[in-house]
Amino acid sequence: MIPMKTHLGILMLTLLSLKNVYPKNQQEAPLTINLPRVEYFQNPEGIDVVRPRFSWELIGEGRNRSQKAYQIIVASTAQKLENTTGDIWDSGRVSTQETNQIEYAGMPLKSNTKYYWKVRVWDEKDQESEWSESSYWSMGLLKFSNWQGLFIGHDVGYSTADKYDSLYLPPARYVRKSFTLSKKVKKATAYATALGLYELRLNGNKVREDYFLPGWTDYDKRLYYQTYDITSSLQLGENVVGAIIADGWYAGYIGYALFIYFDKVREFYGTNPAFMGQIHLEYEDGSTEIIASDVTWTVNEGPTREADIIMGETYDARLEHSGWDTPNYDDSDWNPPKLYTYPNGKLQAHPGTLVQEREELKPVEVTEPEPGTYVFNLGKNIAGIAELKVEGPAGTKVRLRFGEILRSDGNIQTDNLRKARATDTYILKGEGIEVWKPKFTYHGFQYVEVTGYPGVPTADAITGIVLSSIDTDASTFDSANKMNNTLFENIKTTQSANFFEVPTDCPQRDERLGWTGDAHTYVRSATYNSDVAAFITKFLVDLDDAQRWYGAYPNFAPFPFSRVNQYSPAWMDAGVIIPYNMYKVYNDKRILEYMYDGMEKFMQFQEDASTDYLRPGGGNNWGDWLSVNEETSHDFIASSFYGYDANLMAEMAEVLGKSDDAVKYRQLFQDIRKAFAKRYITESGQTTEDTQTTYALALYFDLFPDNLAHKGAARLAEKIKNNGFKFATGFLGTKHVMLALSKYGHNDVAYKIYQQTEYPSWGYSVENGATSIWERWNSYTKSDAKNSDLNAKMNSFSHYSFGSVAQWMFQFALGIDSEDSGYRNILIKPAVSKEMEFMEGSYKSINGTIASAWKWKGNRLEMDVEIPANTKAKIYIPTSDPSRIKEGNTSLMKTSEVEVLASNETETIVLVGSGKYSFTIKM
Ligand code: BGC
């Protein structure tokens, strides 16, 4: 055995000698291909996009690595792919740098068919890469006529009780079908959906790990289905397929309907949940068979007595039908199903990412504020469920309630849940250790209150399960300020809690709606923390479906409450701002095409509502929602967003090759800009309303006349200084203050407000123990745990809107941005300031990981940058004098690997190819 030290010594020597053998400009190894994906997914099952798009990332050592060409092969069998026989599509060698949004152009794709694919590339020196790992995708059911299943359910009656005085929470329904396989199956695929929610079961197990299927849509427009490869779960002889179905968004309580006494409080889309599915069997002998939901299935109630997304779940384990979803079960006392009809609309594959378990949390503390009432603290404020572990006599009722914060007496605070009952109940069957978690509900919480527990629970009685549609793993961030680092964690926690089938405003109270204002404010931040391309694609379909017939985008999507609160300036603009960001971040032009007609209609709606290019407030107008001490007029907000929309429309029209439209919208933007300046901006460069938000919006949206913009920015900086480096802004103004300050070079002010800890600021929440982003600047203080002087009913502790500073942190503070779309031509332009000692972070873009770090060492600034293969970056180095800059040990003037593009009075701009670069700057 070689001692560790010697081992390291040998390694060092080897590295040193390698360095000599392979001097710097030696030919590097060919590129390698990472993350081959189709429609943003690795190996997706059951997509229904007929011209799917491919993408991959490239990894290459050294510098200036790029792709010269690619070749994609699509085959009908794994064997053919192995032999590189592209019988479905062989793109041939395509000379291009593109690695994403590459459209399939082979033979027409067929329903219920699996396709195998791989890609290889040639690098800048024409070296050929290895083929990517063998990948696949399968097509779902492309035609309505492919469906044979009937919508089946179980009639449990309906409520006759007063809808406001008592909750109606019907039991979940169970459906099952036993079938026998007498010959060997080559391939088996299940397709399933429900009006309501379903969990698919096969031979005793849940099929795949997703929750809240088939997802939420405005069901009269479309209903999604899922595809499952179940080949390996079937057996010769008897098999049992089953589903548990519940009301979900289709028939259950939604949002604040009960809270504000709508004429309807539940059953917005239909009254009874129903399941529909079918299994396609392909036998080894070539024959096929379809087992579809129909009148031969049987149905029943079971242990899940209540199952509502907002109200919670009740499970009576004594009522379990043991073995109901496995062979050898006698279902003679089950009933034939009731048939239901499908609403008018399309049946499609879910295009987004699905809710799954993302993290498990062990309690950090268990307290007993009252005898028999136990409170489990999970350490952070999440969305999800609690798993209960319990042993006791049959019939014992354990109740779980959920809270985001504690009252001063140590009990959970539930006032802010409003009408969300958020209570789960488990009734024991009394057979040893019982472990249970709900299937059809979720809560926003940090604390779980347990009552009725038999004996004293140990800490492992409760496990927190984080549910979310996304992983927040695309970004890393660190800085010299610990508070800001905690803020970053809190932002990710809150994004996870609210990227839940749709981007919700909050996960705890009776709301949980896809509020559009919140979503567009946060969308760019969201992209830094997570790959949200598929998630947002799905939400844009929701938004397009929910567009009002007169052109406005609604306050939230999906939009079940058709008679109320239809639209609002600065919320409805999500219909333009979010697609634009999808293009900018993921280079996704297809989503622009999809949204374009609706966006045009929306622009027309705005034009009709405006006079002399100024768009008045109107609709449901919340202004700069939750601002403090300053009011910005609704008219100002409406016109500024109208201008911003016009500008984005011009760029999107251009990208889609609609040059006439581009000219039209550019002109519209100029007209709005002129009218806006005349109405709202004085000759001395102040806004007529002189609030922080007015400057932030007008500056960031380019609505200031060019000659006055710097004056406006200086006034914004001055106002913030006069306000003690604190905000007076709400949902709309806050992030734009940060973006506008940095856009106009007031970085020192931006860092002061960013690091502020006095109310109102982000630091204030962190110092008060926040583990998430609050709805209000003053949601809570340690000394006011009862929240008595606040609007307790409207006080969420998990609202991502104020977390939209993540955009500034990545786009400005670290300076990671895309000059074009999709980060092929990257900008690294960090907002360096003496107010911060160091900052570092990274972002997994669609082209690979981009990293940026900067650090002060006395009067020297160090900048480290990492640029992925096949991209270029313009790096902005904050000195006017290039001779003060070194890259590695070499002066910038002497190196050939960094091209100096320009210098001005504040910065030197250099161009680099892929690779790692370390700059030292004498300041
Ligand atoms: C939501 C917000 C939303 C707002 C509109 C609230 O109830 O929670 O986040 O944007 O309504 O003002």
Image (spheres, grey):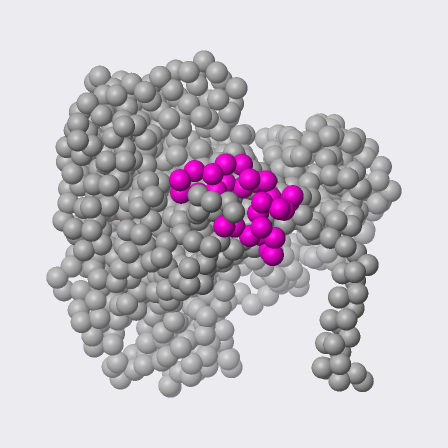
Q: Magenta stretch? A: 884-911
Q: Position of residue 235 (x, y in %)?
A: 74, 58
The residue that appears at 49% across and 17% down in the rendered structure is: 658
Residue 548 figure quarter: top left
Residue found at the very far top of the displayed protein = 660
Whether residue 388 appears in this view of the structure is yes
Q: Is residue 910 magenta?
A: yes
Q: Is residue 101 left or right of residue 339?
A: right
Q: Position of residue 159 (x, y in %)?
A: 31, 50
Residue 744 figure quarter: top left
The residue that appears at 61% across and 53% down in the rendered structure is: 890
Q: Is residue 530 magenta?
A: no
Front residue of 878 and 282: 878
Residue 385 versus residue 592 in the image, above or below: below
Front residue of 718 and 364: 718
The residue that appears at 26% across and 84% down in the rendered structure is: 371
Q: Position of residue 3 (x, y in %)?
A: 75, 84
Q: Is residue 303 left or right of residue 681?
A: right
The residue that appears at 49% across and 57% down in the rendered structure is: 862
Q: Is residue 453 left or right of residue 845?
A: left
Whether residue 477 appears in this view of the structure is no
Residue 365 versus residue 894 in the image, above or below: below
